[in-house]
Image: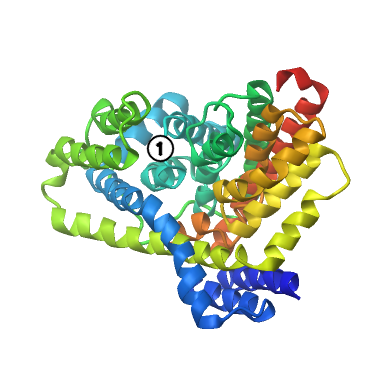
Amino acid sequence: MGIIGCLLGFLIVIIFCYKDWSVYIATIVGAAVVMLFNWLPFIDTLTGDFIEGMFVPIQSFFFILLFGNIQAKVYSVSGAAYAIAESIMSVLLKPGASNTRKNVIAISVLLVIGIVLCMGGINASVFIVLMYPIALTIFEHCDIPKRFILGVLGACSYTFTLTMPGSPQVTNVAAMSALGTSADVAAVPGLVGAAVEIVVTLVLLNLLINRGRARGEHFQLHPLDPHYDARSPKPRFWVAILPLIILFVLFNVVKVDINICIIISTAISILLFWPQLHGASIRELLSTGASESIHMSMTVAAICGFAGVVTNTEAFTAMLDFMVGLDMSPMLICAIVVAVMCMLTGGSSTGQLVSLPLIAPRLLDLGLNVGAIHRIACFAATTLDSLPYSGAILMLLPLCHMKLREVYPPLFITTVVATTSGTIAVIITCALFPGLT
């Protein structure tokens, strides 16, 4: 009954979120179902496990999201985002280009920026906030329907950039912490998996975008979306990217705390773009960016609160024990257990920290190399952690002013289908060439 309650709770959260209910209502109702089926005290669990679960992402990401959102506003209002997008697209996109060429160039440009910034240590969610106004301009330039924007940005940050060898993102770091491995272990299988994810993303998103155009879909801004008049003054390209370069160097080279990096980068942005900002209300700009970040933080917190209730049930422990005891290839056991744990906990790092200490000894006894465990677990962690109730996805809906049912199909392609394909490629590479792990 406890297991049924956990699964039913997840189903309720998914349905409520997909039907545009408040994530707070959805998670509380889902948690109540889990508590009912597991005979947990309602008030004690709600004020205990649920609130404690909410506190984890607030402690980790509050200031990152706060100043990241403010910086995104600065880039939008000043025209810096437009300057970056215009410069890049003017070089790559020639007049008369086919729709397919437009799609591939737009996605590829954002993928390259995502690799540089996320591999440099910029938090994946902050990357999406920072890049949203730039992506809008690129999408408008290429006439790509806006409902694909989170799918493309998710492909840049919630997929292989979390799991590639050497990635400083929490997904790769979680495996390092649990297994005692290095960041670049099993490098070749990891690079193969990343390449597969990129190819799957480019092919499938291009097909979906062209199909949307064939149905008469075009790019259309929401009234609340940032929009920059091309005739308005804007900073030069090199000035526009300087705050991002400084952030990258401070975090990746100087090893400054990410919270300090994003604060410094935001302050430098305001100073450098002051000629373009002086006509705007700085007070309103900063206040709006700050207030929008609160909702994003609380969305993630609500999902983590629900996960906190689930992971503290006996049913959760029973499910984990069952999966660890499956009679199949150790590589498949590793991928399945980690993927399911990340689905249940709502995070690619949390799921690994829960499951790897429990399954790694058994996998090692079965002869699986620790390097293979690390890389397979990393890639598997990004397959089911982005279902419709994922806090990392729900917190972005206010940013793009769209409904979950509009943006999720492309997100499913990039953060579930592509990542699953990459995971399969890693498993096959590890199986055929065990010496590479």
Give me the residue at 75% from left, 72% from top. Answer: 4
Q: Which of 91/133 is in front?
A: 133
Q: Which of 267/121 is in front?
A: 121
Q: Where, by quadrant of the figure, is residue 41 drawn?
A: bottom right
Say above or below: 395 vs 333.
below
The coloring applied to the image is rainbow
- Judging from the image, what secondary structure is the residue with disc 1 in? loop
The C terminus - image quarter:
top right
Q: Position of residue 305 (x, y in %)?
A: 50, 66
Q: Where is residue 338 in the image (x, y as percent from the top left)?
A: 68, 47
Q: In this view, does 153 lie to the left or right of 192?
A: left
Give me the residue at 11% from left, 50% from top. Answer: 279
Answer whether residue 378 is visible to the viewer in this image.
yes
Q: Mark 1 points at which residue?
A: 122
Q: Is residue 398 left or right of residue 366?
A: left
Answer whether residue 208 is visible to the viewer in this image.
no
Q: Is residue 170 left or right of residue 323?
A: left
Say above or below: 34 vs 176.
below
Give me the residue at 63% from left, 30% from top. Answer: 194
Q: Where is residue 207 in the image (x, y as percent from the top left)?
A: 67, 43
Please, what is the three-letter code of the amino acid marked with disc 1?
Ile
Q: Where is residue 386 in the image (x, y as percent from the top left)?
A: 60, 53
